[in-house]
Every structure is written in C-alpha cells, then in structure tokens.
Amino acid sequence: MALQIKHATKTQSRLRMGAFGPSGAGKTMTSLRIATGLGGKIGVIDTERGSAAKYSDRWPFDVIELPDHSIDTYIDAIHAFAKAEYDVLIIDSISHAWEWLLDFIDKLGKTKYKGNKWSAWSEGTPKQQQLVDAILQYPGHVIATMRSKTEWVTEQNDRGKSTPVRIGVAPRQRDGVEYEFDVLLEMNVENVGRIIKDRTGKFQDAIIEKPGEEFGQQLAEWLSSGAPAVGEPLVAEPTRQAPKKADAGEKRSQGDVLAQALSASGLASSVHLEAASKVLGAAVEDLDALSKDDAHRLYQAAKAVKGGETTWGDYGLSGQVEDEFPADPPEGMFDEEEPA
C-alpha cells in the first residue's frame, strides 16, 4: 500500500471534553455553562434520575433520562441526539457506564467463564470501545462528566486551623480514558477548575474559577479556526449483539432461542436477564445456564406475551422492541430434565 506524505494542516473540529470531580464540584452546571458558550442546540444524557432538569430554568436544553446504565442504552441515546442534529451533547455522567460494565464483567466471569474475570474482559473491552467510538464519532461537540475517586486531606484554613477537605483524585472510568479527550477539566468542591490536559495549547494548567460561558466561547473560537473539515457522517448505528437468527439446519443454542423469543415479545436485549429473573423468581445471569424446565417456563412466558395473553407490564417491565417470534425450538431443547 502506497502511503502519502502531506503537510499537516489544522482543520476546524469538534470538542471532546471530559470534566471530573467529587460530588458538589458543579460538573453538571459547569458543563451546561460551557455548552452554552460553545453555542447551538444542547442535548443532555442524564444518568442521575432527572438531576440535570433542575438547571432547566437557567439554561435551555433537551434531555434523555436513561432508564438503565447499560452501554447499549448510552449508545442509543448518543445516536438519538446525533440523528436530531444537536450541536452540543453533554453526557452526565459516563461513570455509571463504567460501573455497569464492572458489574457485567463480575456476573459474566462467575457464570460463563467459571470465575475467570480476565477472560470475561474479552467481551467487556469491546463494549467499552463501542461507547468510546460513539462519543468520538458524534457529529457535534461532546462534554462527558465523570465522578471522581474521593480522598480526604487536611489543609489549613484562612484562620490557620487544620480542616479536612474532600478532593477528587482520579476519574471513575477505565484507566486511560483521558487520552480520548482534547480537554480534561478537574473540578474541586469550590467550583474551581484546573485544565490538566489541553490540545488547544491555550489553557494547559490554567486555574479557572467557575468555568462557564466565556470559557466555552474561547474553546469555540479555537475549534472554528483552520481549514474547513471534511464532512463526516452521522454517528453510525451501534453494533449490537442481537439475537442470532440461525440459517436453516444450523443448530441454535438455548440462549439464542430464548433471547430471540424475548426480543420478539417486545423486550430490548438489555433487560432480557431482568425479565428472566422476574419470570423465574430468582436471579438469572446466563440464559444458557438455565435448566430445561426453567428455560421452558421462560419461553412460554415470552410466547404468551407475544400472543397477547399477558403483558410484560404484569412483570413490572415495559416492551421496547419487536421482532419475528422464533419458530418452535429444536426438538428436546426445553424438555424437562430427568430427575437425578
């Protein structure tokens, strides 16, 4: 393959900014103020049960409140704002996605990988990368907040007395996530920000008291300088580990058949295990690990919902997607197990 050498040229670009700090540092408010300075229509992905809406009387924005913290749900929300052409996206916060992934790995390691969490990361790392890719491909500015790991230190106050002070020491996300951002802002509980990473070359190590609209305008000025950027497509549809539809004659696993049945009955893949747990009255972590009796019960429950005999609302769930209900499972798949 012939490689081309060309002169490097700065082009107009979109902001990728991370902001982290302890509780009370003002991450949400600061993000809204900076977004306002950047200009344009603002969308917020709220992972904290409506907390962002408390600021809606001060800054105009639209919001998606996530029903869960799965990475698939994050990506769906990012894609929704991309399709609606929002100029600035605030994700508040991506720490919840990391916590969800750690829980996912813990459960997967205990079940599918027989206690080997390192092997479970073979499925976890691609999910993390899907989230990072969705953020980087967003066709607008992105500000992602992160909670921080917190420590207490002793400092002297203005009267010379020692006082315990809460500080954030690192973002609660995967190690190395800071490499994905152009600007990384560390906030403290006094709402003072410190720029600890800066690709603009203008703000490195700067201390900014209550970063806001003016800082956003300065960022916008730098981002808009340079040659026009080559057009980029909207963020691509996220890749999903959707229930597999087997070709004729291909053997389907129990988990594949159950996942397809649950999707066909109106459930998104992110709530399949929750649905199974509610139907069976016990925690379910792997559809393939169910006994034939439990698998048969779950399959029949999905079939009853699809047939209109009952609803997922009866189990405290709401249907989200629909698909073609699978043909009858392979003979013997859901036969009751013989007693030992």
Image (tube, rainbow, N blue to C red):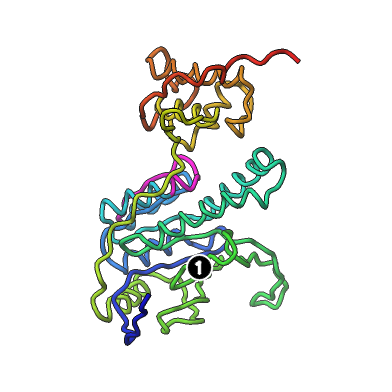
Magenta stretch contains residue 65:
yes
Up the image or down, 140 lies above or below 193; here it is above
Q: Is residue 91 left or right of residue 277?
A: left
Q: Percent x, y for residue 121?
A: 61, 52
Up the image or down, 283 lies above or below 241; here it is above
Magenta stretch contains residue 104:
no
Q: Secondary structure at mark 1?
A: loop
User: Magenta span covers which residues?
Assistant: 60-74
**Which residue position is annotated with label 1?**
191
Mark 1 neighbour density, 10 Å: few (under 14) some (14–19) many (20 or more): some
Location of the C terminus by quadrant is top right
**Which quadrant would residue 168 be assigned to in this image?**
bottom right
For badge 1, the amino acid type reads Asn
Q: Which residue lies most toward the front here?
A: 249
* Residue nearest the viewer, comparing 241 with 160: 241
Q: Percent x, y for residue 179?
A: 51, 70
Q: Is residue 164 left or right of residue 186?
A: right
> How many numbered badges does the structure rendering display?
1
Q: Percent x, y for residue 291?
A: 64, 22
Location of the N terminus by quadrant is bottom left
User: Which residue does the image show at 29% across and 78% down from the upper left?
Assistant: 11
* Residue nearest the viewer, comparing 43 with 274: 274
